């Protein structure tokens, strides 16, 4: 899932930003049940994802709600 966040870099485009920018954390669940960030998504990569019909970011509150339904715990 993508969670809206301020990010300092974009792993998809290999960019480091001088200041935090509006982007997202790509969060997945591991084998132990822990949900954690595996990649940072910058604004350009996020826009491409949305434009191509890919995943749209959700809020922190929506992510917590979804994780509570699916099981596990959020570790960011």
Image (tube, rainbow, N blue to C red):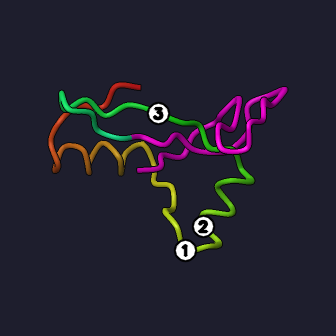
Q: Is residue 35 above or below residue 4?
A: above
Q: Which mark is residue 53?
A: 1
Q: Residue at x 26, y 48 (%)?
A: 65
The image quadrant of residue 61 is top left
> Could you classify mark 1 by the number of other residues whose Cα lies within 10 Å: few (under 14), some (14-19), or many (20 or more)?
few
Residue 52 on image: x %, y %: 61, 73
Between 57 and 34, the one nearer to me in the picture: 34
Residue 38's label in the rendered image is: 3
The location of residue 32, given as percent across then percent down, is 18, 27
- SS category of the residue bearing label 2: helix
Answer left or right for 43 relative to 25.
Answer: right
Q: Which residues are magenta?
A: 1-27
| Count of numbered circles on the image | 3
Q: Give me the C-alpha separation between circle 3 and circle 2.
A: 19 Å
20 vs 23, left or right, is right
Badge number at residue 23: none
Is most of the magenta stretch helix, strand or loop? strand
Q: Please give the name of the residue rendered at 40% of the width and 50% of the height, measured from the top-left corner.
A: 1
- Whichever of callouts 3 and 2 sits on the residue coming sooner in the sequence is 3
The answer to whether residue 45 is above or below residue 18 is below
Q: Is residue 18 magenta?
A: yes
Question: What percent of the width, then of the height, locates residue 63?
Answer: 35, 47
Q: Quadrant of residue 18?
A: top right
Residue 75 counted in the magenta span: no
Asked if disc 2 and disc 1 are in contact, CB closer than 8 Å, the reply is yes
**Measured Cα–Cα span from mark 1 to mark 3:** 21 Å
Can you say which quadrant of the picture contains the C terminus? top left
Q: Which residue is mark 2?
A: 50
Q: Percent position (x, y) of residue 6? A: 64, 36
- Mark 1 residue element: loop
């Amino acid at each position: 899932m993508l969670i809206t966040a301020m990010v300092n870099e974009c792993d998809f485009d290999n960019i480091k930003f001088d200041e935090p920018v509006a982007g997202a954390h790509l969060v997945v669940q591991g084998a132990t049940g822990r949900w954690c960030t595996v990649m940072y998504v910058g604004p350009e990569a996020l826009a491409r994802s949305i434009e191509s019909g890919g995943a749209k970011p959700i809020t922190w509150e929506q992510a917590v709600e979804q994780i509570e339904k699916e099981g596990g715990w959020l570790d960011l």
